[in-house]
Image: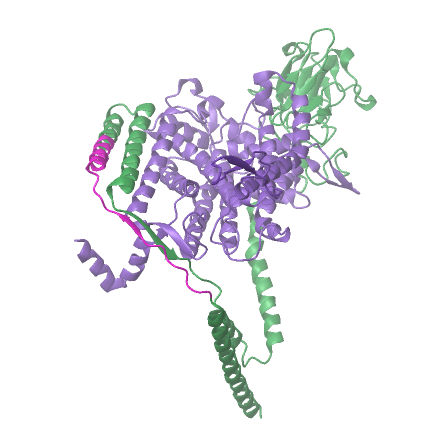
Chain colours: A green, B purple
Amino acid sequence: MSGVGGLLGRALAALTAILFFRRARRRAERRQAEAEAQAPPPEPVPPDELDASPDPGAELAVALLLFAAALAAAGFVFFYAFDADTQALGICLGVALLLAGVAAALAGKRVVIQEKTTEPYSEFGDEEETREVEDYLVEGKVGVTRRRLLFTALGAVGAALGAAAVVPIASLGPRVGNRVYSTPWSPGTKLVDEDGVPLTLRDLGEGEFLTGFPEGAPLDDLASPLIVVRLNPEELELPDDRAHSAPHGVVAYSKICTHAGCAVSMLRYPTFPAQQPRPGLVCPCHYSTFNPCDGGSVEFGPAGRPLPQLPLRIAADGVTLEAAGDFYEPVGPSYGGIREDPRGQS
Amino acid sequence: MIRRAVRALDQRLGASPPLRGALRYVFPDHWTFMLGEIALYCFVVLVGTGIFLTFFYVPSDAVVHYQGGYAPLQGAAMSEAYASVIHISLDVPAGLLIRQTHHWAADVFVVAIVLHLLRILLSGAYRKPRELNYWVGVTLLGLAIFEGFLGYSLVDDLLSGMGLAIAYSVAMSIPVLGGALAFLVWDGEYPGGPTFFARLEILHVLVIPAAIATLIAIHLAQIVRQHHTQFPAEGSERLVRGTPAWPGYALRSIGLFLTVAGVLFLLGGLVQINPIWQWGPYEPYLATNGAQPDWYVGWLIGALRLMPPLSIRLGSYTLNGSPFWGGALFPLVVFGLLYAWPLLMRRLRLDDRRHHNLLQRPRENPKRTALVLAFVGWVFTIFAAGATDRLYFQSFIPYEGQVWVFRAIALFAPFVIYFVTKRVCEELRDREDRPLRGWSGRVIRRDEGTMGFEEVRPRRQER
């Protein structure tokens, strides 16, 4: 039964196809005839211009330029073997190429035959050819009966294979998780310099700053580096809950700008009486300016949130600086939920 | 000799008909058509010098202590990547020449592409049937800028580290996907996992150059298929007129290639560029004032500096305004506009849907020319704002004031440029069409009878 049905179906499809193509061909022929009737008369082609007159002077000039180029190139080999001075090498090679280039251009303009000629632009969009391609494409579905089912299956395999091809990208890096919130700081962590030497009050005069790191932690962790500034205690306008975070006027902020992750490595500290403008911690990349007196608020520039402050205290020896806790805000360039929100709530 | 070679090729490959077509292929002449060629030849120089550099570069962040010939860095801790580039620059014979030529070629490459793009936009060369090739070209510009950024990021000197920190922050700031994206690219939190420099290198020396080379091939193949556009001086919409490829044009083009290469090697040998040994190695806690990236990244730096930190809060989630607006959205808008340009101009009825093989001079389409210049002026203003810090050091004009001025210019300059350009183009066009327009002289005529002169009352001048 199904065999007979299938045969019948196929025969019908073939018949349709034949009819279809007949019609298509007739249509194409008609269109071609119309197009020919409408086609504008061919445009007169301007005559070619030819100038083959010899120019011995130019030939001599080209030859001289090429010899000079050869000399300069040989100079490159010479200098490479004996001195390899960058300037000498650059002059030799550059001049050699330049002279050869001028020689080639001159030869193209003056030595060889000068021609001006015309070609027709290619004509695109021929109706008949387009239709033929269309017909061949449409032929693909002739005789296919369960088209929707097949396309559904095709869509399913396409999507699944696509997903399978994309998923391994996730192997390229770890998940973010809480990584950006973790810091090497905790109460009692000593501040040290690049070489691991503890920082003390004596290292800092008023209006001076240092770069500090947590003792024993990697230096290149974004949460490690601090910019430690000593201000006049009377200048401080810290919020009440941070009142004890700056012993002797020493404040510490994350050195990583909250805008684009550069190192905040400039301190603006006017010393004359007017004290204008106010002290500022400045990032050299895009000049985000933070106020070191009030907990790192943004004074100017593109940064979207304050520079995170780290509370400090003085160790038992009375001079060594150590952390009194972790940062008040998340460290590093902002992303997603990180803004002013205290850590854990974002 | 020639005959035998041609016959041998023809018998084996049937090469004569295509060879004949290639030798007689007609190139229309105009100096602006050389800009794309210059870009192509820069790419050739880039590939040549780049291959030399790959033989020395070590894509590793492992810490080594410098033991080369440069005294000031003796014993300094640095990444193997940075040490290898110092080695190329200061110890390998001709290494510095090749490295500096490579760097110069990259800068000139992007200059040539941008000027080429300007010519395409101003002369309407992107119109039907050449939209596809235009889009290939815009993609090439994007890839060239990205490739350049990768290139100077590989070095791992202070400058490249600062650039990468900014790139990481911009990636982080992309809504929803940002954090995951940045961690995937950097293999962890900044400054990245141990595989990071190997990733940068394979992108810089294989993936992106292969993409650029493929697109250049497609770019050229389309030109071969469609023929180059031409200005209306000699040819017409249906006939292209110019110099055949062989011998005149080929020799001139070879001459251009050699000249471009010569200039690049002269620059590489004589004009210092990116003296990485002076910047020193990078650490995340180091930065320097007055650092400027390569010029083609300047527009992004400018946008980052100008864009105020507007953030949008949705419940507990913050759409982090900066650096997203300047670093990610701004380039998306610029490239979006570039890609949409042919469709946009059609929608605005400044271009039609017909086939065009003839170019327009800028004045022939005043509104479109004005739009092009307004757009370019807008991007250029923001580009110039990337140099505010240099301007501050040179002139001591306060930095904050400059930023506000540049913000204002970026907002208003496009409108001013638009109206001025449109007016100028209309004036030029009208003067050409009607030379006597607005003329206040008198027309006199010789009277054949009296042999005297009499004034001719002109009919009212048409406007």
Residue at position x 52%, y 87% from top? Answer: A15
Q: Position of residue B162 (x, y in %)?
A: 56, 29
The reply to whether residue A178 is in sight is yes
Near-viewer residue (A168 or A270): A270
**What residue range appears in magenta?**
A40-69
Seen as rendered, the residue at the extreme right is A240
Near-viewer residue (A234 or B365): B365
Quadrant in which the N terminus of chain A is drawn: bottom right
Is A50 contained in the magenta span? yes
Q: Position of residue A307 (x, y in %)?
A: 70, 26
Report whether B129 appears left or right of A187.
left
Q: Position of residue B302 (x, y in %)?
A: 61, 31
Is A331 contained in the magenta span? no
Name above or below for residue B7 compared with residue A322: below
Near-viewer residue (A109 or B15): A109
Quadrant in which the C terminus of chain A is drawn: top right
Report whether A257 appears left or right of B18.
right
